[in-house]
Each structure stands twice: as C-alpha cells, then as structure tokens.
Image (tube, helix red, strand yellow):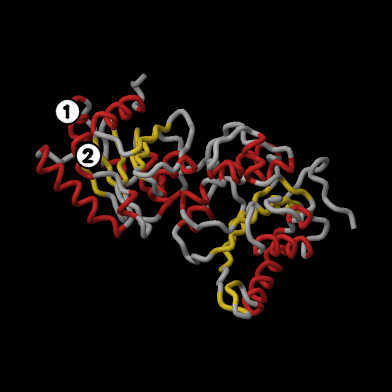
C-alpha cells in the first residue's frame, strides 16, 4: 500500500490531534501552527481532533467556527480505575475507537499530526486513525526515547527543539506545537496566533455595538473563570486609579467583559470608579453577553484591550488588537511576544498608564 509522502505530495486533509487543555487560550495557541500549515498547503483542509476531559467547554464552539479549520471534533476521554491504575479502560476505548473510525471514514486524512509530547492516549489515537485511513502517515514528537518510532515522522523533544532554536525555557506554549511540525521542515518564524470575528460577533457589532461609540474604546477583562481566578486577577483599585487618571487626558468608552459569573467583579470595579471619580456613564458592563463568538466581536470593537491572564487576553492577541496583559505571577510561557502586546507584572498605576499610551493608535 502506497503511503502519503509529505515531503513530495500535497495533502488534501490534515488531521491534528490535541488533548492538553480545553481552555480558550490553550486551544487558540495552536492557531499559529494552523496558520503555518495553511501557508505551506493552502489547498489542504485542516481538521482538529481534541481528546477532552472537559466535554462541553465553551471553547468548543469558538474553535469549531475558526476560519482556518474545516472541522473540529471533541471526543470525551474519561478516566477511571483499571487494574488498580488510573487511566482509560477497555470499555471507554471501545467508544473512542468507534468515534475515531467514523471521523476517519468521513475525513480520510492523508496526514495525521499528533501535537502532544506526553502520554500514550494521543499516540494510540494517531496509530488507530492511521490504520483506518488508507495510505496516511503520522507525525509526532520524540519526547522520550523510543516514542518517535511510533510515528512515521517525528520531531525532536521539546527541550531539544528549544535548545536548537535558542528559545528560552520554559518555552512559549505556542511554540510547543511546532516540535511536531519540525519533522515536516515547518518553522514558526514569528507567526502569531490568529482569530477572525464570525457571524455572532459581526451581528453584535452591527446591532448592540453600534450604540457603544466613542473615538476611543478600551476593553477590560478583570475576571478569570478558572478556580485559581483570584490570584490571577489584576488589582481592582490599581485599575480604577490608572484608568480614571488616563481618562482625564484621553476620554474613552470602557467595555467591561467577562463570563456571567464574573459580573460581581465588574460591579466592584464600577462602584470603585464611581466612588473615586464620580462619572461612570461611559462604562458598559458586557459580562455574560452571548457566547465566545460574541465576545470576539466585542473585543474586536475595541481599540485597546486590557486583561489578566485569561481566555479573552489570548482572544485579543489572536484578533490583532493592541493588548495590555497584566500578570501577577511570572509565567513567560504564557506571554505573547508580538509588537502589539505589552506584558506587565504586578504593575503600578503609572506603569499601566504608560503602557496604554504606548499601545494607542496615536502612541509612539
């Protein structure tokens, strides 16, 4: 049986296997790799297969509508105890294989890329998909000795990949997907993560968004919906002070974003702003407004976006919006190193004001 040769042939369908985390930012970080694959094979259709331990996560809808993906499939990967050890048991694998067979029959991928460097689940899935897709080949990451032999092509371990490219460790999460692509001779070359506003976001912009005008619109995402939200949120009092002072010389409309369960944190900000500055008529609380697709439209409506380490931060970067990201912890692997992003670590009022000034369209 003739195998597909990615060094000589153009694939029609590429299936990308992921399983790390279903967070918005975690999945969007893969979009840089999707963009590079699309540039290399512009006629190929990209399909995402995500093995999820978080079925129904909000990011699924956003990713299914991503402009670079032909399709996205989320298969639950439920763990239990088998023979005294945690893992996916035979009964669960039977369901997974049935779903994989249906996907392989529908997509018929020539190229199957497993981006996960750790664990056996994605390796098993890749090999099973290969067995159900005539002539296809697999690409993976040789993270540990012997793992590379389980694929037709294998990129280097993450540490070796970073060392060979003089990348700092811990390595930017976005670069991790390129360890597998190195087996195909594909490099990131500064490619940022990408996202486009879809139908729901455009509908918001042409509807409710029209009522939110102003020469300068700044978006602010204070909350974070994850369990460790409190330690990742920017200091509210500092934000009230910085944005209030900045507004005295640069009038702007402020759009507060967030999930429905983050409305309380936005109310605290508005109450603090009213007490400190009085006039809060130009502040709009849009938390809980629609889906992540709607949120993309809201973020894209802003000239500048400010956020802690959260999904909207990554969305703003992917949309190409000038973004100020405020971190409380030093996490270089979560930093986006692109010209229109500024990273601050537990900043004071003056630092935030200076960074906003840098990012504004009329700034330096």
Which residue in the protein does label 2 denote?
A: 238
Give coordinates of residue 18: x percent, y percent.
60, 56
Q: Write down the quadrant of residue 355 in the picture.
A: top left
Give coordinates of residue 177: x percent, y percent.
61, 46
Q: Verify CB contact (< 8 Å) between mark 1 and mark 2.
A: no
- Mark 1 or mark 2, earlier in chain: 2
The tag on residue 248 is 1
Residue at the spot 83% in from the left edge and 40% down from the top edge: 8
Residue 206 visible:
no
Residue at mark 1 to residue at mark 2: CA–CA distance: 16 Å
Tag 2 secondary structure: helix
Examine the rendered structure and indicate whether residue 8 appears above or below residue 357: below
Q: Write down the quadrant of residue 126 in the picture.
A: bottom right
Q: Is residue 175 left or right of residue 90?
A: left
The front one of 188 and 118 is 118
Q: How many marks?
A: 2
Q: Is residue 175 left or right of residue 264?
A: right
Q: Where the C terminus falls, by quadrant?
A: top left
């Amino acid at each position: 049986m003739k195998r597909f040769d990615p060094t000589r042939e153009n694939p029609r369908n590429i299936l990308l296997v992921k399983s790390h985390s279903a967070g918005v930012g975690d999945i969007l970080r893969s979009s840089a790799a999707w963009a590079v694959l699309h540039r290399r094979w512009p006629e190929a259709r990209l399909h995402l297969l995500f093995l999820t331990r978080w079925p129904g996560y909000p990011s699924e809808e956003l990713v299914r509508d991503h402009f670079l993906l032909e399709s996205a499939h989320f298969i639950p990967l439920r763990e239990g105890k088998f023979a005294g050890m945690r893992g996916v048991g035979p009964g669960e694998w039977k369901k997974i294989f049935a779903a994989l067979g249906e996907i392989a029959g529908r997509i018929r991928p020539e190229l199957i890329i497993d981006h996960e460097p750790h664990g056996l689940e994605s390796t098993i899935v890749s090999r099973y998909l290969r067995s159900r897709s005539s002539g296809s080949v697999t690409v993976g990451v040789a993270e540990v000795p012997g793992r590379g032999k389980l694929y037709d092509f294998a990129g280097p371990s993450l540490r070796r990949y970073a060392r060979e490219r003089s990348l700092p460790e811990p390595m930017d999460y976005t670069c991790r997907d390129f360890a597998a692509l190195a087996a195909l001779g594909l490099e990131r070359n500064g490619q940022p993560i990408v996202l486009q506003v879809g139908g729901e976001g455009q509908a918001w912009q042409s509807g409710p968004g029209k009522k939110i005008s102003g020469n300068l619109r700044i978006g602010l995402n204070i909350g974070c919906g994850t369990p460790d939200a409190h330690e990742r949120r920017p200091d509210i009092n500092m934000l009230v002070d910085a944005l209030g002072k900045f507004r005295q010389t640069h009038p702007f409309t402020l759009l507060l974003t967030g999930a429905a369960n983050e409305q309380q944190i936005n109310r605290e900000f508005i109450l603090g702003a009213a007490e400190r500055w009085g006039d809060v008529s130009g502040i709009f609380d849009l938390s809980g407004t629609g889906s992540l697709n709607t949120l993309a439209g809201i973020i894209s409506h802003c000239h500048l976006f400010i956020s802690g380490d959260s999904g909207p931060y990554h969305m703003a970067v992917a949309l190409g919006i000038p973004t100020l990201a405020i971190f409380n912890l030093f996490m270089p692997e979560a930093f986006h190193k692109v010209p229109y992003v500024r990273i601050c670590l537990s900043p004071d009022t003056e630092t935030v004001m200076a960074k906003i000034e840098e990012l504004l369209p009329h700034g330096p």
